Amino acid sequence: MSTTLLVIQHVHHEGPELVGQLARERGMTLQTLRPDRGDCLPNPSECPNSIALVLGGPMGVNERHQSDLHWLQTELNWLMAWHQQRRPVLGICLGAQLLAVAAGGCVKPLQVGAPPQQLKELGLGAIHWVADPTHEALLQGQPSGSLALHWHGDRIHLPSDATLLGSSLHCAEQVFRIGDHAIGLQCHLEINRDALQRWIANDHTYVMSALGPEGPERLMREWRWLGDKLQEQGRHFFNTALDQLQECCKTR
């Protein structure tokens, strides 16, 4: 029986991109659900051989009590059950924030400096691996650092049983795992050129508020310089992550 990649998507312009491509190359079945549109999430006990991929979105996990985002609390409750049963899960951006909160962590605004000032971390930039690659299967074969797309204004405070894997200059909690079944990325390694253009078009105001009026062109210029390298490193990371999560499917 093939593995199912259960894609939890929150907005039309943020899809699975590279992760979906790699999953299809492995013969996995992709099933996309939109809880923001009323799709019901499945009982975790009835999802054998499935990996949840929880994607990003412009909303924040702390906005889940707003009347128009009530579905986000429902999704968080579902993810808590999924995690408690140690079902394999990969969370990206909002998905990583939801995963951390589901496991007992929290999310707060990203602040830097003294006195603290809120920061929007946006653009292509480095992350460095802080865990020992000889003890971390996810990091074996990785260089000491990687390129990633940053696109957030929050910071994850990890649950006590999480292992921090990667950090950026302004945000320590960029990549983490919980046990062998849960992996979270605040940053984006799944992005491609077409997706970046869609994100800029849909979040144009956010981009300019973070980077100024030249922000959209700056992002595309960075992609022309560095996009191929980011995708190469993303392919390596996600292939390793899918190897690990598929192995988890065999023991759940």
Image (cartoon, helix red, strand yellow):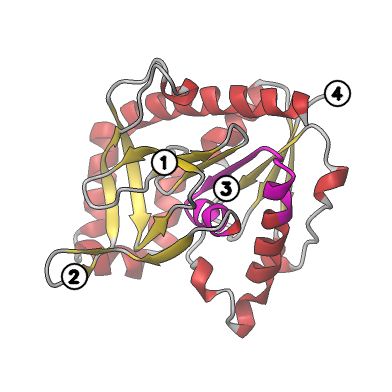
The boundaries of the magenta stretch are: 81-101
Report, in whole angstroms, how far the alpha carbon at label 1 lies from the one at label 2: 23 Å
The disc, 4 or 1, on the residue closer to the chain's N-terminal end is: 4
Q: Left or right: where does residue 135 sit relative to residue 67?
A: left
The label on residue 34 is: none
The disc, 3 or 2, on the residue closer to the chain's N-terminal end is: 3
Report, in whole angstroms, how far the alpha carbon at label 3 lies from the one at label 1: 19 Å
Q: Are marks 4 and 2 in contact (CB under 8 Å)?
A: no
Report, in whole angstroms, how far the alpha carbon at label 3 lies from the one at label 2: 33 Å
Q: Secondary structure at mark 1?
A: strand
Question: From this viewpoint, which residue is outermost toward the bottom?
Answer: 67
Residue 252, percent across and down? Answer: 78, 32
The label on residue 116 is: 2
Residue type at mark 4 is Met
Q: Secondary structure at mark 3?
A: loop
Residue type at mark 1 is Val
Q: Nearer the viewer, residue 105 or 92?
A: 105
